[in-house]
Image (cartoon, rainbow, N blue to C red):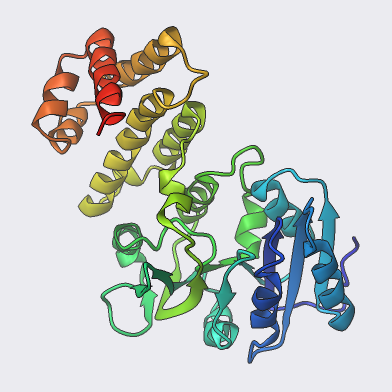
Amino acid sequence: MSKNINFIPTFSIIIPIFNAEKFLAQCIESILAQSYSNWELILINDGSSDKSSQICDIFAHKDSRIKVIHKLNEGVSKARNSGLDIAHGKYICFVDADDIVDPSLLEVLLPFTKKEIDCLVYGYDRIHNGNLEKFILPDKGTVEIQESYFDLFIWKLKKYNLFVPLWNKAYKRSIIEDYNLRNENDISINEDLIFNQRFFHHIRTSTYINLPLYHYTLFSTENCLSKRICDPQILLHVSEVIQKSDFHNSSCKELASFDKFFYWDFIRLSYLNAFQLPQYNFHDKLKIITIFLSLTKKDPDFKLYIANLGKIKSFIYQWKSKYFIYLYHTIYQAIRKYI
C-alpha cells in the first residue's frame, strides 16, 4: 500500500484485529468521533475468520482516512508492525480492537505534539467485577516531565501500572524509525513491555495527562495477560531486554530498585512457568533453574531480591541448589492441585 505524501497526519492510529466483530465497530466509531480530525486510521485484519474483514472495508469505504491491511494470521506483534511500516503520522497511537478511546483524546494531545515531546502518556479506566477502576498517577493535572525528573517519572508509570501498555501513549514516530523499533514478531505476551523498555531507553522528554482517556475492556480475570502461562524462553528474553535498557543503573533509586526486582522476577518466572507446561520435562526444568542460579552468582543484588520473597523462598534460594529448588516447586505444584 503506497503512502499519500500530500497528507501528513498528526496521528497514525494502529488497530490490530483478530475476530473482533463484536466490538470492532464501536472501537472504530470512537476514532471517527474524535474532535480533532487530522489523523489516519490503520486497520490490520490479522486473518480474522468472522466478519471483522467486512467491517473494516465498510468503514474504509466511508472515510478516506482509514486504511485497511488484510493479512494472514501471524499474531498481534506482526499486525502492529505492518501498521508501523505504512504509518506516516507525526505520532503513533495503538488501540486494541475491543476498546474505545475518549472523543477528546487527540485534541487533548495536540498541544504537546507541537512541542515535539517524545512520548505522551495518559491514564485509562476499566470495568472490573462491575466496578469502574481508574489508572492514573496521584499527581494533579498535566505534567510536563523535566529531564532531571524523567527516571522518577518512569518509576511512577511502572508503580501505577501505566508503563507497560502500548495503548495509553502517543509515540513520536521519528524516534521509532531512528532506532528501528518494532514489536517482537514472534511474541504476543509481554511484547508491549519489551517495546516500551526500548523506547523509553531512547527518550528524555514526556508529558503525562492525568485523565482516563482510554477505556479498556477487561472480560474476566482469566483473560488477563498476567494469568497466562508464558514460554520460559520468552521470559528469559524479556529479562535480557530489561537488563539492556539499563534502568537498573539509574540514579533514581526507586527506578533502579524496581527494574532490578523486575529483572529477577522474569528470570525466576521462566523456570516457574516451565513447571506449568507439559512439554518441559525434568531435564528442561533443571536447565532453566541452572540458568537462574548461574546469574545469581554474578549479581550481589540477588540477596535483596530474595529477601522480598518471604522466609520460605529465601531459605530455598539461598542454598543455590537446582535439585533443592526443583524438589520444592514440584511439591508446591502438587499441593496446589488439591487446594
Quarter-wise, where is residue 283 in the image? top left
Looking at the rendered image, the quarter that the N terminus falls into is bottom right
Image height of 7 relative to 249, above or below: below
Q: Residue at 82% of width from left, 46% of height from top? A: 72
| Of residues 259 and 179, the one drawn nearer to the viewer in this rendering | 259
Q: Which residue lies furthest to the front in this view?
A: 338
Q: Kindly identify the residue that appears in the image at 8 percent across and 30 percent down.
A: 311
Residue extending furthest toward the bottom? 35
Image side of residue 338 versus residue 76, left or right: left
Residue 188, percent from left and from top: 59, 44
- Residue 307 spot, x, y in % from top left: 13, 34
Image side of residue 292 versus residue 122, left or right: left
Residue 161 in sight here: yes
Quadrant of residue 176 within the rendered picture: bottom right
Q: Residue at x 86, y 82 (%)?
A: 62
Taking depth in this image into account, of 94 and 48 the one nearest to the observer is: 48
The one nearer the camera, 312 or 223, is: 223
Residue drawn at (20%, 26%) of the image = 300
Residue 13 horizontal/vertical position (percent): 67, 70
Report if residue 88 is visible in the image: no
Number of marks drawn: 0
75 relative to 70, above or below: above
Specify whether 9 is left or right of 142: right
In the picture, which quadrant includes the C terminus?
top left
Query: Percent x, y for residue 223?
Result: 48, 52
Residue extending farthest left:
311
